[in-house]
Amino acid sequence: MSERFADLHLHTNFSDGTYSPEDLVVKALDNGLNCISLTDHDTVEGLERTISYGDKKGIEVIPGIEVSAQFDSVEVHILGYFIDYKSDFFLERLKELKLIRVERIYRIAEKLNNLGLNISAKDILSLAEGSTV
């Protein structure tokens, strides 16, 4: 049996990653991986493309996510694997998380402005181009 290599914590440009879903698959193959899990922050928008392209290229793609949460006023990130990324209930919860992230950007921008930095929350959001901030 040949060795198998995996990376189970990867992001695309749908959250804070650099690569498109297709480019991520290519990079994974270039680095000798047989299996990956896309775990974008609070979004599953890139999963369908990643899985589809992975199928075409012969790499296993495990549907995943990195969900932000609060525990004792500390932000924690929870990784989930083999998720039902088409579940209406799940997708509705992700919409709620996205709204919380947007509200957080406005609070952060306000704090930065109070410290003398001139930055607009709208500018930050426009840089995200609709993806997770």
Image (cartoon, rainbow, N blue to C red):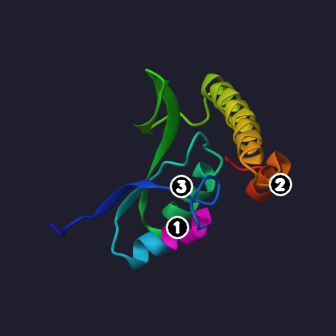
Q: Residue furthest left?
A: 1
Q: Is residue 12 left or right of residue 30?
A: right
Disc 3, disc 2: CB below 8 Å? no
Viewer-proximal residue among 103 and 107: 107
Q: Residue 9 location, x and y as percent?
A: 41, 53
Going from the N terminus, do you reach mark 1 or mark 2 first? 1
Q: Is residue 124 left or right of residue 36?
A: right
> Which quadrant, please, contains the N terminus?
bottom left
Residue at the image point whose x is 79% and y is 53% from the top = 119
Q: Kindly identify which residue carries mark 1.
A: 24
Q: Which mark, by number, is residue 123?
A: 2
Viewer-proximal residue among 10 and 89: 10
**Which residue type does callout 1 highlight?**
Leu
Q: Does 22 appear above or below 64?
A: below
Going from the N terminus, do you reach mark 3 or mark 2 first? 3
Q: Is 11 included in the stretch rendered in magenta?
A: no
| Element assignment for label 1 | helix
Q: Which mark, by number, is residue 51?
A: 3
- Give the class, few, some or many, for how many residues have Cα within 10 Å of label 1's Cα (few <14, many ≥20): many
Q: Is residue 40 left or right of residue 71?
A: right
Q: Is 25 included in the stretch rendered in magenta?
A: yes
Q: Estimate the spatial distance between the alpha carbons at disc 3 and disc 2, rounded to whole Å.
A: 32 Å
Q: Estimate the spatial distance between the alpha carbons at disc 1 and disc 2, rounded to whole Å.
A: 27 Å
Numbered disc total: 3
Q: Does 92 appear above or below 52?
A: above
Q: Which residues are magenta?
A: 20-26
